[in-house]
Amino acid sequence: MNDAPRITIRNLALGYGGRPVVEQLDWDIAPGSLTAIIGANGSGKSTLLRAVAGELRPLAGAIDGLDGTVTSYLPQDAGIDRAFPISVADLAAMGLWRKVGAFGRIGRHWSGELERALGLVGLSGAARLPIATLSGGQFQRVLFARLILEDADLILLDEPFAAVDRETTADLVGLVRQWAAEGRTVVVALHDLDQVRQHFPETLRLAGGRGVQGATAQILSVLGAAGVSTAPAGQLRGGAVA
């Protein structure tokens, strides 16, 4: 990978119904960086990811560097009806639409890529299973297989490890780190500060509508000095960082 973008955000304001959630945000995202977004509930983490993904128009300011960039975005709620009668392979193969088209045929090559992606998320042999039979962790693994097949330059994830077991979290964190090692730009909204501390070199903290970016150790040390718990499994609670 060598196409990861440099994203520059200047004086960005985001919100709903004209009411800002994020204001005057400046943020530089280096190519190939691995960044966590942290903040209390309602601080604008999901809103910011939606804007970078192109799903929310800014109230003011600009996001530059996205032209021609292949972007994958996994929201916290994927919006997929788990009762819908499709298989693991069907859902994962949606990641190939950009390459083969919505009605394109998945030939031998792409079938091999699909099998490889399922193997990388620990679902070898599960291709024909209905998604309705999957556990929460297995379902998240399928969504990550879809991300692998999308082969994006920029990957945006909103709380991707929430409500999944420890083993699944460890496997998916490994994939996230591998994407960054390949030179992809990865931005992940998280509430678990222990995960942030262990795996993410850069952090953007949102609080009171504003943002501060920097090395993770520096950002978390400031939180600790402010009296916010950064103990293992700590979480940002309600206005604790506002």
Image: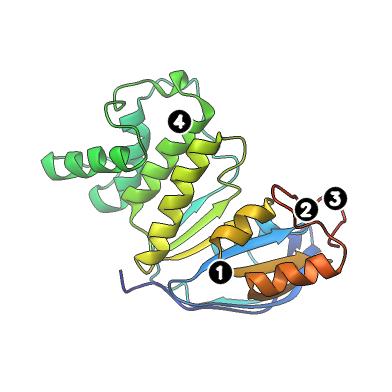
The amino acid type, in three-letter code, at marker 4 is: Gln
Please give the residue where the numbered disc 4 appears in the rendered image.
Answer: 138
Residue positioned 61% across, 53% down in the render: 195
Find residue 51 and report its horizontal and vertical position in percent. 61, 62
| Of labels 3 and 1, the one closer to you | 1
Relative height, residue 127 to residue 53 (above, below): above
How packed is label 4: few (under 14 Cα within 10 Å), some, or many (20 or more)? many
Query: Which quadrant holds residue 209?
Result: bottom right
The amino acid type, in three-letter code, at marker 1 is: Pro
Please give the residue where the numbered disc 2 appears in the rendered image.
Answer: 236
| Mark sitting earlier along the chain (4/2) | 4
| Mark sitting earlier along the chain (4/3) | 4
Q: Which mark, residue 41? A: none
The amino acid type, in three-letter code, at marker 2 is: Leu
**76 or 238: nearer the viewer:** 238
The amino acid type, in three-letter code, at marker 3 is: Gly
Find the distance from the CA under tag 2 to the CA under tag 1. 19 Å
- Residue 23, visible in the rendered structure: yes
Q: Which mark, residue 201? A: 1
Q: Secondary structure at mark 3?
A: loop
